Image: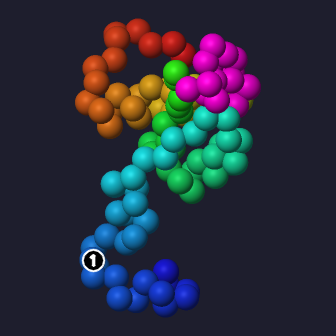
Amino acid sequence: MTRSGYGSGWPDKKNSPTDVLRRNFWFCMIEDASTICTRHTIGVDNILFESDYPHGDGTWPDTQQVIENVLGSLPVEEIRKITHENAARVYRHALPKVCIP
């Protein structure tokens, strides 16, 4: 925004477009590895894993293996956010006392 000048007319001087995006948007992923390498740019708190069940092009019944293949090398805190904590926060859904991982 600052380098190109395209955002010079942005009306909110306290919050940048990036701030607004991270406050108001969440991004779903299925098996897209590019999401993993850009997760810190997107914001780990703004990514939700989806299985797309019951659609035939979703990950079910192999969702657990897909999660392991795509997210398995990430820190546990990030896996938890992407797989269930972020969705619980967005949808205001209580989580069980024990969640794995």
Q: Give percent across and percent down for residue 38.
A: 64, 52
Residue in the picture at 37% in, 72% down? 16
Q: Give percent across and percent down for residue 68.
A: 69, 22
Q: Is residue 70 above or below residue 20?
A: above
Dot 1 alpha-carbon crowd within 10 angstroms: few under 14, some 14 to 19, many 20 or more? few
On the question of residue 77 being in view, the answer is no
Number of numbered discs overlaid on the protein picture: 1
Which quarter of the figure is the C terminus placed in? top right
Q: Is residue 63 magenta?
A: yes
- Where is residue 13, by image quadrant? bottom left
Residue in the picture at 35% in, 63% down? 20
Q: Give percent across and percent down for residue 77.
A: 52, 29
Q: Which residue is mark 1?
A: 12
- Where is residue 70, by image quadrant? top right
Q: Give percent across and percent down for residue 59.
A: 63, 24
Of residues 50 and 82, the one nearer the viewer is: 50
Residue in the picture at 48% in, 87% down? 6
For mark 1, give the secondary structure. loop
In the image: residue 47, left or right of residue 75: left
In the image: residue 32, left or right of residue 55: right
Which contiguous range is marked in magenta? 55-70
On the question of residue 63 being in view, the answer is yes
Q: Name which residue type carries label 1.
A: Asp
| Figure coloring | rainbow
Residue in the picture at 35% in, 28% down? 88
Of residues 55 and 1, the one nearer the viewer is: 55
In the image: residue 80, left or right of residue 87: right
